[in-house]
Image (spheres, grey):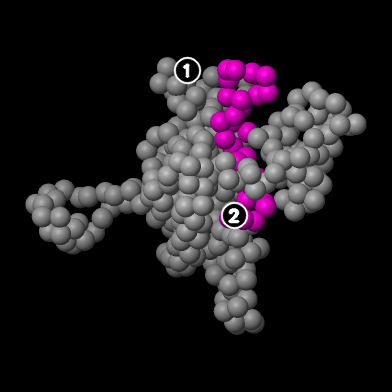
């Protein structure tokens, strides 16, 4: 279904490349590292995003590199802002970074999970509302101005999607009024926000963890094992490490994959007789919002980039 959530952009242009480059890590079997920063996602001229997940992680995790997108400020607005601040009017065009997620994340306080979760929810909902407005602009103009350097095919695809989405939302509104539109919007968003149990998987699937028994090295992907009910609730996406190891395996088979290769996954040391399913999703969310980690070992990946590897 056409979605205000922005999943179309992610699934069409960012999911497969995310598997290769998440957190600016080198692709499997290679040494090349790409710039997967938030700024690069908006400024790149590549057909696909270098790492589409960074668009979501910007609301809840530490990132390396510059934020984005950067947009040109209208001259009249730039002059007015300069006057308010008591500064001379700018002589050249002014560009400003517009990132709802990063603006809210900078106001997080370590050890205050309630405050941080509220800021995350507010920025997430605000961005989704802005996306709905932007969908209408893209539908009318045929271009997504937030990605000015993308090839023409990208913009044609975005425009086709946004026109379809606008038509579906209009029909939904005509059939069910504002309540139907509200239900669609909230159903696309609320599962990503605490205290919804699925949010535990969403906010922690790409952290900077350590493998059990290991003191060095960073694990950029994690799974949430909270029982069969949780796997059903999240449609199998809670097996996120398994998904990245074998992206061609359907989500409903990932739990079986964990049993086939128990030596590679947490909590399977005892085999089928002693499968660990005891993750507390609310404790997971509390820790994620109290002590945010770098997205997908981005801190380690940044060291690789600086070394030119």
**Toward which corner of the image does residue 16 lie, by quadrant?**
top right
**Toward which corner of the image does residue 165 lie, by quadrant?**
bottom right
Spot occupied by residue 212 in the image (x, y as percentages of width and height): 68, 23
Magenta region: 193-221
Crowding at dot 2, Cα within 10 Å, few <14 / some 14-19 / many 20+, comes out as many
Residue at numbered disc 2: 194
Residue at numbered disc 1: 309
**Was residue 258 drawn as part of the magenta stretch in this picture?**
no
**Was residue 216 drawn as part of the magenta stretch in this picture?**
yes
Residue at 74%, 29% in the rendered image:
266
**Which numbered disc covers residue 207?**
none
**Residue 257 in sight:** no
Residue at 42%, 33% in the rendered image:
64
Residue at 84%, 37% in the rendered image:
256
CA–CA distance between discs 1 and 2? 38 Å
Q: Is residue 54 left or right of residue 92?
A: right
Q: Residue furthest right?
A: 273
Residue at 55%, 70% in the rendered image:
166
Seen from the viewer's position, the closer of residues 47 and 121 is: 121
Up/down of 86 relative to 33, above or below? below
Of the 4 image quadrants, the one containing the N terminus is bottom right
Up/down of 252 relative to 214, above or below? below
Spot occupied by residue 126 in the image (x, y as percentages of width and height): 46, 61
Indicate which label's residue lies in the foreground, 1 or 2: 2
């Amino acid at each position: 279904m056409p979605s205000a959530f922005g999943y179309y952009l992610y699934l069409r242009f960012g999911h497969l490349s995310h598997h290769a480059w998440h957190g600016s890590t080198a692709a499997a079997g290679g040494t090349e590292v790409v710039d997967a920063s938030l700024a690069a996602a908006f400024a790149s001229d590549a057909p696909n995003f270098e790492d589409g997940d960074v668009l979501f992680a910007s609301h809840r995790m530490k990132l390396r590199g510059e934020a984005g997108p950067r947009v040109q400020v209208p001259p009249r607005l730039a002059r007015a802002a300069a006057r308010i601040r008591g500064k001379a009017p700018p002589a050249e065009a002014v560009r400003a970074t517009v990132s709802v997620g990063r603006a809210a994340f900078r106001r997080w306080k370590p050890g205050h999970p309630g405050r941080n979760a509220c800021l995350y929810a507010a920025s997430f909902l605000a961005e989704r509302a802005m996306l709905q407005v932007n969908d209408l602009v893209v539908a009318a103009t045929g271009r997504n101005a937030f990605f000015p350097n993308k090839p023409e095919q990208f913009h044609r695809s975005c425009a086709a999607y946004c026109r379809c989405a606008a038509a579906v939302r209009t029909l939904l509104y005509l059939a069910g009024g504002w309540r139907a539109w509200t239900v669609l919007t909230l159903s696309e968003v609320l599962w990503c926000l605490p205290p919804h149990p699925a949010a535990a998987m969403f906010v922690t699937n790409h952290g900077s963890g350590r493998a059990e028994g290991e003191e060095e090295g960073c694990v950029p992907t994690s799974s949430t094992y909270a029982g069969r009910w949780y796997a059903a609730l999240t449609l199998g996406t809670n097996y996120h490490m398994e998904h990245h190891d074998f992206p061609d395996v359907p989500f409903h088979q990932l739990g079986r994959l964990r049993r086939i290769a128990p030596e590679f996954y947490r909590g399977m040391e005892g085999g089928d007789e002693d499968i660990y399913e005891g993750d507390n999703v609310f404790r997971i969310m509390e820790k994620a919002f109290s002590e945010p980690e770098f997205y997908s070992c981005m801190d380690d990946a940044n060291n690789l980039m600086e070394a030119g590897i």
